Every structure is written in structure tokens, then in C-alpha cells.
Image (cartoon, coloured by chain):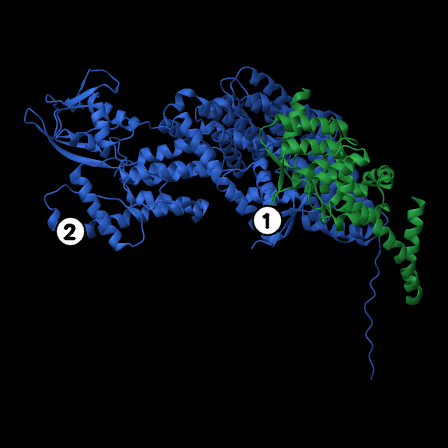
Chain colours: A green, B blue
Amino acid sequence: MPRTSSKKGSRNSTASYSSSTMDLFRAASGKIASKELERIDQLFYSYANNSDTIEPEGIESLCSDLEVDHTDVRILMLAWKMQAKKQGYFTREEWRRGLKAMKVDTISKIKKALPELEKEVRRPSNLVDFYSYAFRYCLTEEKQKSIDIESICILLDLVLGLDFRPQVDALVLYLKMQNDYKVINLDQWMGFYRFCNEISFPDFSNYDPELAWPLVLDNFVDWMRAKEG
Amino acid sequence: MNFRIDPFKHEVVVNPKYADNTWKILEHAIRDIYNHKASRLSFQQLYRNAYNMVVHESGEKLYSGLVSTMKSLLQEVCECIEAAYGGSFLEELNTKWIDHNEALQNIGDILLYMDRTFIPRTHKTPIRELGINLWRDNVIHSSNIQTRLLNTLLELILGERTGEVINRGLMRNTTKMLMELGSSVYQEDLEKPFIEVSSDFYGLKSQEFIERSDCGDYLKEAERCLNEEIARVSHYLDTKSEAKITNVVEKEMIANHMLRLLHMENSGLVKMLLDDKFEDLGRMYSLFNRVPNGLSMIRDAMTSHIRNTGEQLVTDPEKLKNPVEFVDCLLQKRDKYEKIISFAFNNDKTFQNAFDSSFKYFINLNPCSPEYMSLFLDDKLRKGPKRVKEDDIEIILDNVMRLFRYLQEKDLFEKYYKKHLAKRFLSGKTIFDDAESSLIVKLKTECGCQFTSKLEGMFTDMKTSQDAMQGFYAAHGAELENGPTLVVQVLTACSWSTESGITCNLPPELSALSERFRSYYLGKHKGRILSYKTNMGTADLKAIFGNGQKYQLNVSTYQMCILMLFNNADCLSYKEIDQATEIPSSDLKRCLQSLACVKGKNVLRKEPTSKNIEEDDAFSVNDKFTSKLRKVKIRTVVAQKESESEKQQTRQRVEEARKPQIDAAIVRIMKSRKVLDHKNVIAEVTKQLQSRFLTNTGDIKKQLESLIEREFLERDTTDSQLYRYLNTIP
């Protein structure tokens, strides 16, 4: 952490230097960067089978090298860091973006950086972004706008399970039980996040159905209240 | 020469005894005045005496002499009055008061000069006022008179309240005297105690009276008391007392008993409403109106009564059996309260509003109300045995429109109305063309032209169909002279929600004719599609039975197709008929049932005879058919009201049709507002749509979410309560 921040600091301060000194710095750091980039690319091609993308099989072997399950939330975090567009695929550009930002270029470094990445994601300012990214990442088809209930339940558990365990459990139970909705769209998905953050659980004392909550949450609260008594 | 003229110096010699002597003369005169001997006096002489006294500095003596003389005279008067017996007390008091006034007048004349000069200069009380003050202090406020006077007055008033006749003139004079002595004297010596005593009196009276009388009688009595007190004031009290005494009656007789009066069993408000007691209700209104919150109590009681009885009415299973009777009951109820409010409740707007909202409440409790109202109109506008007079129809329409305004699901009404109107049109059963179009105009003013556009389309179709038929027969009439007559009604599919695709095989004569019309029509209107709805028409058939009897049969198109088969066959099985006509089986069964199983109309005979149609049955012409009438109308057995499942379907269709309307409203609003918060969106959408149906928040939310998904709107990323209109629609 301190290393990263000091580097960041030096990079930011370059703005105030004269252009000649800046060039000097750029040349020096450029050399280091190109070496680093070389190693990053090397690692990329070891999984990409000499094509321009790491495909699902490549990701599988990456996971086993990292000793995490491919359904583990940390893989989703890695994808978030890379801003990967398509589920199950990493392009070279995405790979570079992610690894450079994490300052890693070997498997063992990635492995070591994972806990740090997890902390970063859990920071509130990042969590919303990660949360909405997780939804978009799961849209695999062209023009697909919503995700089936079953996948939504898994995803909810994955991304919010740690912070909002009781809410997620109740919501998943409800979603699997109800028949009104077969899919969930992004608006509803973002509604879940707001709901977990803002609404007192399990008494829902500050829940106002007159506000713009998605209907599915109105129904959820009704269902919970009916169940309670 | 200079002359100077000096005035003549007159030496005035004043007798030192002059003042004393002169006063003696004056004092004597004053006493004479009080003793009715004034006629003997020379007022000029006396005036000069008094003048001289004032001029010669004896004003003070004159004034104080006057005061003490009057005092002693009034004490004598006092004794006189005290001595008066019982009833004559007041009379004596009055006589003496009149005397005193007269005396004051005379004394004033004599002492005029003092009144004009000496008194203003020395700031003393003028003579008339002095006389009144002395009367007040020495007579009215003397210990023996003050209480006796009050008691006498109060006793007399009580006497009058209990029916005695009293001398009002005397009362009037007495109270007038008190008023002349100053408003505080009147108030302290009479008004205050009068109000207190009255308060006790009416408090007690109301308690007793309410125990032994019903609400109507009690209110009558309260009104009588009120009027009596108002009359009393006008007869012998100060007008300012009116507000005070009516206040007492209002509080004691009305305000303290309002709840009890309203809810009196068998005579309270409910009973009055039930029995249309306009007079009693009007009395209650005007009496309660005098009391704070009085009217709102009546209004609340009325509201809850209307709600309760209305709820009973719309949920009464007996009433629900007959839609016409159901709506009749609603109309009667509305009419009843309209009368009550205008005759008894002074056309009070707040009552009218309370009534409207109660009606709105219960009429919408029953989801069938829209359907029944349309059925009611159908009954009135349809040809039938109980024909309504043309003049009355307009009144009926207006009344139904008033009920219509209470409906929340106006679109459901429209659905049913359209269906019933179609039936009337197509069966040629509508009698009042003017009334039909007048109703459309009314609906249009109420709900806008979008609401009635399809209904208007139906009108246009009826008109153009007539023209088309005329054109057809003008073109082909000659060649068709000997065949059957065809009447086609050309209906625009989107205006008439007819079921699609059901046709049957027409008899060859007719199918040729109808094809001919088709080619005529399509020749006129290129690019249209014409399909025959054989399930909706009627036919008139000439039939000659085996016994030679001729009849004209009025039947449905389906029935006509069945009967025509018997021109070429004596006996047909169900299956043969089915094959030949291809009428859908449920309809076929119903048609056969009404042709073969209805007593008196059974032009067909069925083997075996039974109530229901089975697939193995065989049919033949009933040779023994007879009827008193030459024209026989054979109805198909149809359900008048919708069955439960049909109702469900209609409701579903209506609800489905609401979604695009909600969408349109949201988009309209968001297009003009660009950004708007959730609560306002809900409020505005509800407002825009309320003339057609009542939306609930859930339905609007659903459409909002769907519009977000379809990218007409987006939710603001920071404030989740805000919606943004997206201008990216291609």
C-alpha cells in the first residue's frame, strides 16, 4: 500500500515539473514499465494460447494456478479490475489494464494482491460500481437487459453475501418462491443494493412503499411482514 | 360741540333676604308640580325668579335646593310605590315615573336659564340627567324596590313562558325606563339575571322534555322556544338582548343534546331520512346551523347512514340478480337524497359533496356497477314491451350520467356499453336514435373524445351501411327481385370488438347473394377485406307447415341456416345438421334447443323428446305447430348478464388496455417535465387518468419500471426518487 501511494504521489507531482524534467522521468519510468509490460504480456500468452483473448479454458487454468474456484467472488473482482466486457473472456487490453493497476506481473504476485483487491472492492465508493458491474458482466447475450432469477440469487449471494447476510438470505428465499418475476433488470438490481444499505432489517421500519422502490421490493416487504405475523 | 351720553346708572338694591325668599317660592312651585298643581303656577314669573337667582350669584343655592327638594320628593314617591299591592306595584311605579318625567319637564322650563348658563359653567349635572340619576338612586335602587322590581319582572316572564297572558305594555314601559336610566342599569338590573334564570329554565326544561318526546317533537319545541324568546325581545326587551337569549336557548336546548337527538331510536336523523321527513330535517338543519359544529354532526351522521345503506344495497344478492332493478334502486336513492338536500338542507354544498363522496364510495364497492349501468341503459333504449316514452328517455339518460360520474372504472363501463350498443344496433332493437347519439355526446363531454371515438365509429358504420345497401339494390335490384332480400351491415373491425373468424355455411341462395354483395362492395372500396359474421345476424322466414298454416318466423342467421335445410329433407340428425352448416357446436346446441324445446315456439320436433340436445338426436319439422300470432319470434337462449368467467375475461381485457394508457400518460408528463420525482409522477398520472379509471400505485410503478427497461426513462443515479426522460427514442 505505501509503495503504491508514494509512486502515485510522484506521478501526480510530475505535473508541476517543467516539460524537460518530465520527459526525463518518462523515459526512465518508461523503461521500467516496458519491462513490466513484457512480463504481463508473457503471463497473458501463457493462458491465451497465442490468441488475443484468454478463453474460458484459459481462465479455468488461471483459477487453478491461483488456487481459487472459478465461481469465487475474487475472480469477479479481478474481472472488475480489468473492466472485462465479456463473461469468461479476458482480452489483452483488459489483462494489461488490470495487472498494471494492481502492480503485479506474476501468478504469485496476483495471488498475494488478491486480499488487497478485496479490500479495495469493499470500500463503499467502489462497492456500488462493483455491484452494478457484476450485473452487466453477467449479460452475455446481445441486447440482453435482464438476468434470470436463479443467476440473480447466486450473484446476490456472491457480491452482497458478506456485508448483508440476513437480507440476502431473505431476498433469495423470496425470489425463489415468487412467481411474478422470472427475470430481474438493472433498475431492480440497483434497487436491491439501495434497499440493503438504507432499510432497517428485519423490521423495515423506514420502508415507505409510496417511494420509488421497485414493485418487487414492495412485494418482498409485504411477504416478509405477512410471514412475521 | 361735543356731547357724551353716559348710560343711566341704575342702582340695584338687593335685598339680603331676596335669595331665600325667591327660593322658597321656587321650592313651593316644585312641590306643586309634583302634586299635580302646576296649572296654578305662573311659569313666566317663576322663570324670572330663577333667572334672578342665577344672575345674583345664587345659582349654587338654587341648584343644591333643587337637589335636596327632589330627593325628599322622590322619597315620598318611593313610599307610595312600596305601599302598592302585588300587581299594582308595577303600575304605580310606571305612573310615578311618568309623573316624574313630566315634573322634570316643567322644572326644566322654569330653571332653563340655570340649565343653560350656570350648570355648564360649574360643570354640574344638567337638570334632566340629574332627575334621572336621582330617580335611579332613590327609587329604583332603593332597597325595598330593587329586588321587588326584578322579581316581579322575572315572575311575569316566567308566567308568560308557562302560558299566562301578561300586560306587555306595562313590561315594555318598565324595561324602557330601565334602559333610559342607562344601559348598565338595564343590563345589571334586568338582563343579566334574566339570562341566568333563562339558562336554568331551559336547562331543566330540555332535560325533562327530551325524556318524554321524540326527536321531531323536541325540535319543534326548541324552535317554538326560540321564536318565543325572539318575540319577547321584540315586545318588551332591548334588541341587543336577542343574541344573548337565543344563545341560551341554542346552548341549552340544542347544543347540549345534539348527539342524543341525532341518534334517537326510531325518530332521529336516520328515521327522518328513511321517511323523507323534509320538514323535520329542515328544522334540524336550521336549528343545528345555529350551533358550532352542528351541521358537521348532521353531515357525518348522514354520510355514515348513506354509506351503510348503500353498502347493503350494492351487496344485496337479491338486488344483484336484476341489473335493471339494481340501477333503479341506485337512481331512487340518488333522487331521494337530491330532494332531501334541496328541500331540507338548503342546497348546502358541503352536504352535496358529502353525499357525492359517499355514493362514490359504495357504488364502486360492487365491481358489477359499470356493467349493470350499461345493462340498465340497454333496457331503456331497447325495443320491448315496457317502452319508455320519448320525453322521459332524456331524463333517464341524465340521471344515469350522474351515476356514471361516480364510477371509478369508467373504461369498464365503456367496454360493456360498446358491447350492448352493438347488440342493439345489429338486432335493429334501438328505438331512439336521437337518444343514442345524445348519450354519446354526454359521454364525450364527460370523458373526452378518445373515450367515445369507437362508439362514434359504430354510428358512422350504421349510416354508411344503409347507403351501401341502397347502392347495391339500385345497381342490382332488377336481377334480384325474386330472391331473398339481403341486408348487410358493414362494420369497421377496430370499432366493433367482434369475435373473429366464426362463419358457417350459408344456404346456397344466400351464399350466392352475399358473394354478389361482396364483389359489389369491394368494387367500390378497393383494398378492404370483407368477412361475414354469421353469428350475429337475423332473418325473417316465410314458413308453410304441413297443416297449411303460414307463418313468418323471425330467427337468427344460424337458425335460418338450420331451418333452410328442411326444405330438402324431412328428418335430419344432429350430425347431419352439424356437417351441413358447420355452426360451432355450443351455438348449434343452443339454436336447436330454442327451435325444438321451447313450448309454443317449437317449429322442429326432436327425437327423443327431452330438454337438452344430444349428439344422437334427430330433428324433423313439427307439422302440428300452431301459434296465435302470424309473426313468430324465436329467441336464441342467451345469457343476459355476463357469466363469471366472461366477467373475468372482460376485466382482464380492460386491465390490459389500461397499460398503454398509463404508459402514454407517464410519457406525456415526463416529456414536458423532463425530470420529476416519483410521488409527483404518481399524483399526476392518477389525475390525468381519473376521468377514465382509478389507477393504483402498483400499476403505475409497474409501467414506470417497464418504461425504464424500454429506455424511455432512467432513474437518477444519485437520487433514486427522480426519473429522467430520455430523449433518445428514434
Disc 2 residue crowd, few under 14, some 14–19, many 20+, Cα 10 Å: some
Q: Which residue is mark 1?
A: B712
Which of these two is toward me, B198 or A82?
A: A82
Residue B333 visible in rendering? no
For mark 1, name the chain.
B
Q: Are marks 2 and 1 on the same chain?
A: yes
Residue B443 position by quadrant: top left
Left or right, B607 with reference to B678? left
Looking at the image, residue B337 lies above or below residue B728? above
Q: Secondary structure at mark 1?
A: loop
B404 sits left or right of A227 in the view: left
Residue A131 in the image: state x and y as whole percent. Answer: 74, 40
Q: Quadrant of residue A229?
A: top right
Q: Residue furthest bottom?
A: B1
Horizontal side of B224 relative to B325 (left or right) equals: right
Residue carrying label 2? B476
In the image, residue B102 lies at what x, y percent? 65, 41
| Viewer can see residue B61 | yes
Distance between the alpha carbons at the discs numbered 2 and 1: 56 Å
